[in-house]
């Protein structure tokens, strides 16, 4: 896994305004099917993690849980546990960099 490159790409995605942040906003975006990838911190709370996983699995949206909350926060400049990517191209590249199979 190319962690450093993936985190740098995450910063670029935020600057390109292709990132949805925060649990409620991500859940809403998943329901609207306006996102193509969810990034969930591997140290997220069990209740929040289950809610996000269940919703993403239901709508068949890929999930990456390879990063901690601190890594996601440092990469984006925002203290967030869950993020979602709108652009399919960015999502595909992140999945390649993390070598994670989708939902």
Image: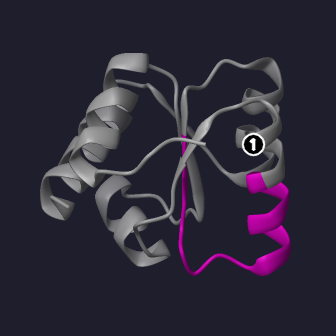
Asked whether residue 103 is drawn in magenta, I would say: no
Q: On screen, 85 above or below 78?
A: above
Residue 44 part of the magenta segment: yes
x 74%, y 54%: residue: 53
Using residue 90 as the reference point, say whether residue 51 is left or right of it.
right
Looking at the figure, which quarter contains the C terminus? Answer: top right
The crowd level at tag 1 (other Cα within 10 Å; few <14, some 14-19, many 20+) is some
Q: In this view, does 69 lie to the left or right of 29?
A: left
Query: How many labels sit on residues?
Result: 1
Q: Is residue 41 left or right of residue 44?
A: left
* Image position of 73 with respect to 15: above or below: below
Judging depth in this view, the residue of 65 and 4 nearest the camera is 65
The structure residue drawn at horizontal position 31% and vertical position 40%, both measured from the top left corner, is 94
Element under label 1? helix
* Residue drawn at the location 33% of the way across and 33% of the way down: 13
Where does label 1 land, which residue? 57
- Magenta span of residues: 38-53
Quadrant that contains the N terminus: bottom left
The chosen color scheme is: one colour
Q: In this view, does 8 lie to the left or right of 25?
A: left
Residue 51 x, y percent position in the rendering = 85, 58
User: Against 94, is 64 above or below?
Assistant: below
Residue drawn where x is 73% and y is 41% of the image: 56
Q: Position of residue 44 (x, y in %)?
A: 65, 76
């Amino acid at each position: 896994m190319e962690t450093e490159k993936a985190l740098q790409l995450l910063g670029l995605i935020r600057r390109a305004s292709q990132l949805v942040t925060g649990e409620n906003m991500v859940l809403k975006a998943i329901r609207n099917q306006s996102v193509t990838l969810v990034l969930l911190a591997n140290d997220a709370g069990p209740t929040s993690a289950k809610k996000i996983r269940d919703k993403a699995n239901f709508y068949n949206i890929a999930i990456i849980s390879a990063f901690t909350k601190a890594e996601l926060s440092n990469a984006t400049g925002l203290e967030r546990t869950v993020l979602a990517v709108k652009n399919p191209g960015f999502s595909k590249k992140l999945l390649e960099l993390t070598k994670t199979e989708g939902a």
